[in-house]
Image (cartoon, helix red, strand yellow):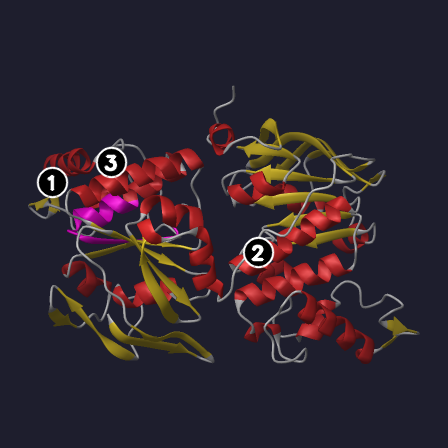
Amino acid sequence: MKGIRKEFPGVMAVDGVDLSINKGEVMGLLGENGAGKSTLMSLLYGVYRLDAGTVEIDGRRVTIKGSGDAIALGLGMVHQAFTLVPNMTVMENIVLGSEPTRAGVLDRKLAARRVDELMTRTGLPVGKDILVENLPTGFKQRVEILKALYRGAKVLILDEPTSVLTPLESEELFKSIRKLTGEGSTVVFITHKLKEVMAITDRITVMRKGKVVGSIATADATFTKLANMMVGRGVERKFVFSEYKPGAVLLSVRDLVVSSRLATRAVNGCSFDVREGEIVGLAGVEGNGQTELVEAIMGMRKPVSGTITIRGRQVSGLETKDIMGLSVGHVPEDRALSGLVLDFSVAENSVLGTVDRPQFSRSGFISFRAVKDFARRIVAKFNVAAPNVDVKVRNLSGGNQQKVIVGRELSNEPHLLVAHQPTRGLDVASTEDIQSLLVGARNAGRGVLLVSADFDEVLDLSDRILVLYEGKILGELKRGVGIDQLGKLLGGVAE
């Protein structure tokens, strides 16, 4: 790829990128969220059209107008959001759109034979006749990979492939990738996780702010080098834990049952406490009830049964604003849906839920000077990249939108902080900053419920780790456990 350029309204997503991908390698495409990695590969796969630049495959210049062209050229892409048909079988999903037919109908015997041969050759077995909706997440991803390979993909692009996998599933994926490259396939591994890119790749290309800043052989890479390339400066672990001395119970959840939007039991009898002076990590592969649990705690979803007590007060049935009035901070999972008003300014968003406090308003009149001063402190302290506090939050990157939320909630010094994916969308340096602030809150005697799909984050920060699986607390682990112990519980294997 040479001189690749793509601009969206007001955003230069990819800015003059040159990128080479060599046959038979695992090439890591590393960068913080919003660096342009997925956009660059989506341009290669034909999801978007180039504004400028050229693509050559095997030395021949090609034009890719859509994914059909990309597939015909031997490219395959597995996106973060799977594109499978849930109520069709594994085999039907793999051959969909490229079905072998006889007399105009699917030749099931031929399709089954081809799929069997593909699974044997690639070492990616999945039950052919199982409905996709009944598969674990790791196997759904395997079907996506098989689907791409069935169509002749020689270059397989995996976009953040471990974001929905347990550690054990990630290990299986890495084994499969090595088997594929051993047989001549080429893999592009898009990620923002340093440990992953060091574990699986042969070469790493780093992107920052829409540009390629360098490429390095994995054997020559270090975490420090890669972090410096990703964020433009060195990153150091800044937080130190004080002695673990948990105090009074701030949050008590007992026998909680919560329904999902599909009326299934998303949370099925959870009980746990969060005390002063501790970080309780709630770990689980996404979709195991974390969202519904947090929404119930924060008054965004009514429980079916059970109790939630915050600082000694029963809160089931209270509005979110009333719950936050008990000195509770909340970093929501979906910043656009629950954390921000996108058409409000940074200043206006900095006081959402608190604008009626005396420091911001008196006798019904808002002091915009006080609001803007508060917002400027958040921008400065949390390194929010915004031209000024009057700019609409919609015009900030996702990572900077997240910083506005985290800054707002921590600046209010809550007794209890419910942090749901607090570092999602942040670069390495900002992630370290936010994690340091969470630890600082814990050291100051505050209680933190940390809900994160980043298992390294949970392991690094938590005094206690609760593992949520299919809506139940499957086990509790203490600080210092390894990823192997956590991984078993994440996959539903209790000792």
- Choose mark 2 or mark 3, whichever is in front: 2
Q: Residues within 10 Å of mark 2 (few under 14, many from 20)?
A: some
Question: Label 1 to label 3, Cα distance in Å?
Answer: 22 Å
Q: Could you give the CA–CA distance between mark 2 and mark 3, rounded to whole angstroms?
A: 35 Å
Task: Identify whether 305 is placed above or below 319.
Answer: above
Q: Secondary structure at mark 1?
A: loop
Where is residue 165? Give x, y as percent: 42, 41
Task: Residue 107: give its label.
Answer: 1
Residue 193 in sight here: no
Identify the element where label 3 is drawn: loop
Q: How far, Cα to Cα, is label 2 from label 1? A: 52 Å
Residue of label 2: 431
Amino acid, disc 3: Leu
Q: Which residue is mark 3?
A: 124
The spot of residue 396 in percent (x, y) is 56, 72
Magenta stretch bounds? 144-160
Quadrant in the picture for residue 457? top right
Sequence-earlier tag: 2 or 1: 1
Q: Which mark is drawn over residue 364?
A: none
Q: Residues within 10 Å of mark 1 (few under 14, many from 20)?
A: few
Q: Tell me: residue 96, above or below residue 433.
A: above
Residue at image position (20%, 70%) is 64
Q: Is residue 292 left or right of residue 315?
A: left
At label 1, the amino acid type is Asp
- The quarter of the rendered structure image containing the N terminus is bottom left
Horizontally, residue 489 falls left or right of residue 444, namely: left
Secondary element type, mark 2: helix
